[in-house]
């Protein structure tokens, strides 16, 4: 994922209370691909991107629209 997608994933992870650190694959090149890691230290971290994205998909429950809806009701 790129930096913009990483920011979105990080925000949703925080909303849902999921653990993980979103960081670039190469700390020297923040314009490159980003991943989700179990800890911030580049020397000891493990990639948990697939596990985290699967957890996001399972737990994501979009809020249904509120208020009146336009349209016709056909019995």
Image (cartoon, rainbow, N blue to C red):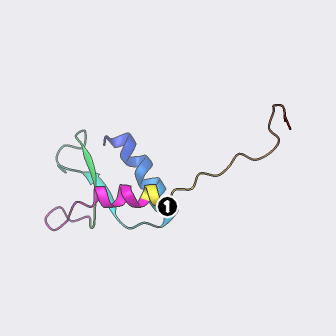
Q: Is residue 54 magenta?
A: yes
- Residue 53, image x, y percentages: 37, 55
Helix, strand or loop at mark 1: helix
- Residue 63, image x, y percentages: 64, 52
- Residue 5, image x, y percentages: 38, 43
Residue at the outermost front position = 75
Above or below, 62 relative to 73? below
Residue 48 position by quadrant: bottom left
> What residue span does the magenta drawing correspond to?
40-55
1 left or right of 75 in image: left
Above or below, 62 relative to 41? above
Instruction: Please give the name of the residue rendered at 22% of the width and 40% of the height, measured from the top-left corner.
Output: 32
- Residue 54, image x, y percentages: 37, 57
Instruction: Please give the name of the residue rendered at 27% of the width and 52% of the height, measured from the top-left corner.
Output: 35
Name the residue carrying label 1. 59
Instruction: Please give the name of the residue rendered at 86% of the width and 38% of the height, measured from the top-left corner.
Output: 75
Q: Is residue 62 magenta?
A: no
Instruction: Please give the name of the residue rendered at 38% of the width and 40% of the height, measured from the top-left corner.
Output: 4
Q: Quadrant of the N terminus?
A: top left
């Amino acid at each position: 994922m790129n930096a913009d997608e990483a920011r979105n994933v990080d925000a949703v992870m925080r909303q849902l209370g999921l653990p993980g650190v979103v960081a670039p694959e190469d700390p020297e090149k923040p314009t490159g691909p980003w991943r989700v890691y179990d800890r911030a230290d580049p020397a000891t971290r493990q990639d948990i991107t697939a596990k985290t994205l699967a957890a996001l998909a399972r737990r994501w429950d979009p809020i249904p629209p509120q208020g009146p809806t336009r349209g016709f009701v056909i019995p």
